[in-house]
Amino acid sequence: MATRIDARFAALKKEGRGALVTFTTAGDPDYETSLELLRQLPGAGADVVELGMPFSDPMADGPAIQAASQRALKAGQTMKKTLQMVREFRKQDDDTPIVLMGYYNPIYIYGVDAFIADCLETGVDGLIVVDVPPEEDEEVCIPALNAGLNFIRLATPTTDGKRLPAVLSNTSGFVYYVSIAGITGTKAPDPRDVHAHVARIKKETDLPVAVGFGVRSPEQARAIAEGADGVVVGTALVDALKSTLDDNEKPGRDTVSKVTDLVRGLAGGLAKSETAAAK
């Protein structure tokens, strides 16, 4: 059965346009502001929304997203509140795919079966759990897939031909290619290098490949999308949000608009790309 993620990437392929996948942290800087931002992202141009599940030790994330998790946790964000945000979002938007991204610990504490059931009930479409390797698929990946959720795996520049089949096994929705080695938001990707790695991955799977880590501008997004099915932008959005907060990390009147303006610019960059429909 096709998911919202499958349907969205299929529609964009027909348009000949790369997907804009946005990442924000649930509850950053507080629940109400984060929910309002979530509601406005699709209208600003987000094709797929990744919602970070705040965690106290986000080891794969750079300083900006680590700080976002800390702000959210300090403001009282919990897994139940993150799922409630999705439930509220679905009251007005039944089309935009939502992917929860984060780490296994909060899922384990919540209870895997309860978490998957609540994901389905609230309207979550997919999961990215960055610290659960393919060797541990029975923990959450297989139960999620059996329930009808997409489970999206990360491939990196160091994922060689021997490792790639394991990464692609049980992956669905799309493959998230991490364009640089290291943590999020610290370097800018080289489009030519990215395109070569994406081409290598696409020889082994029919799934769309979205590229993330380090994309900050419409020009970068357009360049990356020339050789990929989508572009993921996270740190740039988190930085834009942070720039509007006061000394007490409280939101300003322009907190949501600062982020959505950036999303509109990024979406505009992708709209102008020459991405081939037959990638």
Image: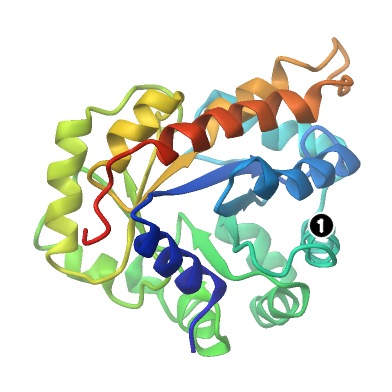
Q: Position of residue 119 (x, y in %)?
A: 70, 73
Which residue is located at x 63 percent, y 62 percent? 96
Residue under numbered circle 1: 85
Q: Position of residue 190 (x, y in %)?
A: 22, 27
Give whichever of 187, 22 is nearer the camera. Answer: 22
Name the image quarter holding the C terminus: bottom left
Q: Position of residue 145 (x, y in %)?
A: 49, 83
* 170 to 12, vertically: above or below: below
Q: Secondary structure at mark 1?
A: helix
* Number of numbered discs visible in the structure rendering: 1
Which residue is located at x 72 percent, y 70 percent? 94
Going by the numbered disc 1, the residue's amino acid type is: Met
* 62 to 161, vertically: above or below: above
Q: Is residue 171 left or right of residue 75?
A: left
Q: Position of residue 230 (x, y in %)?
A: 38, 49
Which residue is located at x 30 percent, y 37 percent? 224
* 39 to 84, vertically: above or below: above
Q: Crowdedness of circle 1 by 10 Å Cα count: few (<14), some, many (20+)?
A: many
Which residue is located at x 28 percent, y 49 percent? 228
